[in-house]
Amino acid sequence: MTTGMVNLLDGARVMPVLTVPVVSTAAPLAEALAAGGAACVEVTFRTPDAEQALRAMAAQGGLTVGAGTVLTAEQAERAVAAGARFVVSPGFDSAVVDRCRRLGVPVVPGIATATELMRALGAGLDTVKLFPAEALGGTAMIRALAAPFPRARFLPTGGIGPAQVAGYLGHPAVVAVGGSWMATTEHLGRGQYEEIRRLTAEAVGAAEAVGASDAGGASDAVRPGDATGVVNAVAAAGAEA
């Protein structure tokens, strides 16, 4: 399951993290993100409409949609029933991890310390969410954790903007970067879907530029971002669960 999640995030590289306050914005939001080149998005369970928004975006097609801010096993169950293809949590909870395994979906728990990372690795996971990334030291924290834990792969989120994308993706242990700047609640409230498309396209372009500059320089132990099909990668992840 964990290898499938690495493949999924490698194929995405930049993942919009979404807080959708009103379900009616979900379909046009999905269209704007897909038009901007996003492959994989996270819908956070932070609003009353989150579950319905996830369902609507998953049904729209063109994106692989996952659930974020999943705090309980029951939330994970509901998210998958709504169409989530993966689950992200701000911390490590063994009940959430176990439920996702039983459901056959990849799970990325959040970590903020070496101890939490060891728990995740000990549970058989190799991909973790570094959260809140910028508050924890950003790329310096990635370097500090990656040195003693070479198997770990990181999805940093929290406080990240477009100026930090290249710095994170330049580290071989980072499989993708998550951020909310591409589609904020302010954008949604104002109906600024063209702006969402533009910001997403810029972020995807920046990530692709990092991948192009790194191509051919990675070792066998650390694979660079590639064009792995997102849907196929998620299917493989489920098969490995």
Image (cartoon, rainbow, N blue to C red):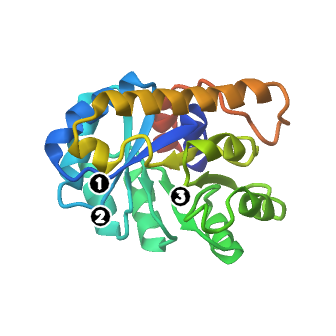
Query: Do tag 3 and tag 1 residues touch (Cβ < 8 Å)?
Result: no
Residue type highlighted by circle 2: Gln
Location of mark 2 (residue): 75
> Which residue is found at the position 72% from the left and 23% from the top?
212
**Who comes first in sequence, dot 3 or dot 1?**
1
Q: CA distance from mark 3 to mark 1?
A: 25 Å
**Depicted 46 relative to depicted 168: above or below:** below
Query: Do tag 2 and tag 3 residues touch (Cβ < 8 Å)?
Result: no
Residue type highlighted by circle 3: Gly
Asked where in the image residue 209 lies, by quadrant, the reply is top right
Q: Position of residue 132 (x, y in %)?
A: 55, 65
Location of mark 3 (residue): 159
> Which residue is found at the position 56% from the left and 40% from the top?
9
Asked where in the image residue 219 lies, by quadrant, the reply is top right
Location of mark 1 (residue): 79
**Who comes first in sequence, dot 2 or dot 3?**
2
Left or right: 175 in relation to 91: right
Asked where in the image residue 216 lies, by quadrant, the reply is top right
Q: Position of residue 225 (x, y in %)?
A: 66, 32
Q: CA distance from mark 2 to mark 3?
A: 25 Å
Q: Number of callouts in the render?
A: 3
Query: Do tag 1 and tag 2 residues touch (Cβ < 8 Å)?
Result: yes
Q: Position of residue 158 (x, y in %)?
A: 52, 59
Q: Tell which tag, 3 or 1, sits nearer the viewer.
A: 3
Q: CA distance from mark 1 to mark 2?
A: 6 Å
